[in-house]
Image (spheres, rainbow, N blue to C red):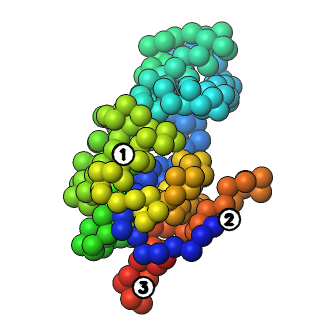
Amino acid sequence: MSRVAMRPSAILFDLDDTILRYEGGDYRKLWRACVEEHCHHFDGLAPRDLFNEIQSISERFWRDPERHRRGRLDMRAARQQFVREAARSLGSPNDQAANELANHYHERRESEVVPFEGALETLEYFKKSPIKTALLTNGGTDTQRRKIESYQLDRFFDCILIEGEFGKGKPNPDVYLHLTRELGVSERESWIVGDNLEWEVRVPQRLGFYAIWNDYLGRGLPRESEVVPDRIVKSIHELIDPATGLPIP
């Protein structure tokens, strides 16, 4: 059951698909375009078949929690693995061409990551307020630091925790508790906001956080979801009351 929020002493923000748009684009279309451009390097393979096999391998990979943890620490390597395995599975192995295709996709994909409308203004507001802020993001150090540096996001936060630097990531309780200790606040007086129902809602709620789910696609909770966020927003900009300029509990 969701609980009533007090105005927070601190807010923990997720990065991808909370501050930066990462999964919201049509990346299947981008994969198809890259496959079509490179498919001639794989003798006898039709672009549709290679694309479908890459998607199938990728989906199986990300469904496994341990593979997910390892893969997100080096997304380029994970994507290279998907293409290599797909080409081999279809009887046309070419590791060099597979890596080049994956690199093309990876570089285009990462270059398309941009802030959501109103996100930077929201972070600027909270930085100027008495509320302490932290950034908590899973992923590899180089990739996540590059995103942070691209938009100078470090200026908005009192603490930043990146999975690849810290050695642990969400949903390990240690990462949330480490940040509240660093900020000098308790979990009960803190908010957390993000797009992952497990990482930013279920586990933080168990620790005492007021958990806000960022439903950036506007699709609502999955029908089978047993997770009940304390609040649902479609943008972190909704955390500020436009009439008063104060955080909305």
Q: Which is in the foreground here, disc 3 or disc 2?
A: 2
Which residue lies under the disc numbered 2?
1
Residue 1 sits in quarter: bottom right
Front residue of this view, candidates 22 and 26:
22
> In the visual, does 83 lie left or right of 76?
right
Front residue of this view, candidates 62 and 173:
173
Say which amino acid is labelled 3.
Pro
Say which amino acid is labelled 1.
His
Tell me what residue is drawn at x 67 percent, y 14 percent.
90
Tell me what residue is drawn at x 55 percent, y 36 percent.
31
For marks 1 and 3, give the CA distance: 32 Å
x%, y% of residue 189? 43, 66
Instruction: Report crowding for label 2: few under 14, some 14 to 19, many 20 or more residues within 10 A (C-alpha).
Output: few
> In the visual, does 139 lie left or right of 202?
left
x%, y% of residue 170? 48, 42
Label located before the other in sequence (2 or 1): 2
Where 80 sits versus 159, above or below? above
x%, y% of residue 126? 31, 70
Which residue lies under the disc numbered 1?
178
Q: Which is in the foreground here, disc 1 or disc 3?
A: 1
Tell me what residue is drawn at x 56 percent, y 56 percent.
205
Q: Is residue 50 visible in the rendered structure shown here?
A: yes
For marks 2 and 1, give the CA distance: 26 Å
SS class of the residue under badge 1? helix
Tell me what residue is drawn at x 34 percent, y 35 percent.
166
Residues at badges 1 and 3 in contact (C-beta under 8 Å)?
Answer: no
Which residue lies under the disc numbered 3?
242
Label located before the other in sequence (3 or 2): 2
Residue 175 sits in quarter: top left
> In the visual, does 134 lie left or right of 50?
left
Say which amino acid is labelled 2.
Met
SS class of the residue under badge 2? loop
